[in-house]
Image (cartoon, grey):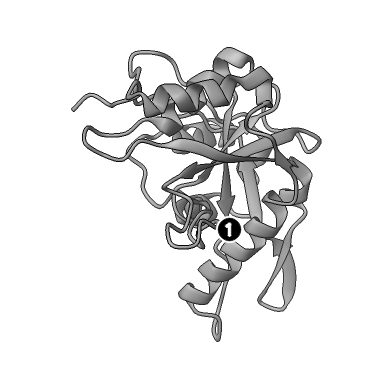
Amino acid sequence: MTSCELCRALFNDSNQKNLAAVAEQQFPNCHCEQFSVGEGSPSRVHDDEILYRMLTDPIDLDQDTGQIAREAFAQAYKDGLSIVRERATDAEMEAVVREVLSVKPNKERRTIRAIFEFRCLTIRDERCVFQGSQHKAFCVYDQTVSRILEPNEPPVATHGTILSRRLFEPPTTKRQFQSDCNDTLHRIITARSVDVTTFRNGLVATLNARSLAGEFIRAV
């Protein structure tokens, strides 16, 4: 298999766990960014693209303070922090949001509380110090994932993911690394917010209402 094929195989393996660690081990230095890795994706994610990250209530909020939870960006150093590309059509945007809002029966219903927009390059330009030199801290991929509500439908083509490269060494501990990662992504991603009520002519606000009405309950 070619390097491109190996990258695609890794990012389309639904059984893969700890993707950030595995990707760094098998394809260090964001090697797979040069390829389109998502099933049905229109292209790799380009540096100048605008991306969106959506925060949900209650998942991403501290229920005591109402502020963004410290773990809101934790998936970046686990299996990938989901993002949506600006080039998404309204239908694709709706499909992604529906998936984000989906819940198991008897679980608290979700709403999109905040939407943040940022340029891909601001993530790719972030650096960390490892073994005495500076390295890219994060990778951005056009990974597409299977749908939860509509498993027989193809993945949403304009979904993507951010992965931390997990570069740290003593005296930095895993816990400190994860905290630093959360803080860095919080700083970059939340710098510019978008009004949820007017985003895409109220598309997300409408989906929030449908979610509260119990429309996005997953099959058992």
For label 1, count other residues whose C-alpha is less than 10 Å away and answer few (under 14), some (14-19) or many (20+).
many
Q: Eyeballing the image, is 20 above or below 196? A: below
Residue 194: percent from left, percent from top: 70, 37
Q: Looking at the picture, tell me which residue is in the foreground, 178 or 140.
A: 178
Residue 153: percent from left, percent from top: 39, 13
Q: Residue furthest left?
A: 220
Q: Looking at the picture, tell me which residue is in the foreground, 109 or 82.
A: 109
* Element carrying mark 1: loop
Q: Residue at x 34, y 22 (%)?
A: 149
- Residue type at mark 1 is Arg
Residue 1 in view, yes or no: no
Q: Residue furthest bottom?
A: 171
In which quadrant of the rendered view does residue 172 lie? bottom right
Q: What is the tally of numbered marks visible in this picture?
A: 1
The C terminus: image quadrant: top left
In which quadrant of the rendered view does residue 68 lie? bottom right
Residue 192: percent from left, percent from top: 75, 45
Q: Residue at x 55, y 78 (%)?
A: 169
Residue 196: percent from left, percent from top: 63, 33
Q: Is residue 217 left or right of residue 4?
A: left
Q: Residue furthest right?
A: 48
Q: Looking at the picture, tell me which residue is in the foreground, 1 or 186.
A: 186
Q: Eyeballing the image, is 138 above or below 56? A: below
Residue 167 in view, yes or no: yes
Q: Eyeballing the image, is 50 above or below 76? A: above
Q: Residue at x 31, y 40 (%)?
A: 108
In which quadrant of the rendered view does residue 119 lie? top right
Q: Eyeballing the image, is 204 above or below 66? A: above
In the picture of the structure, the residue carrying the numbered disc 1 is 165
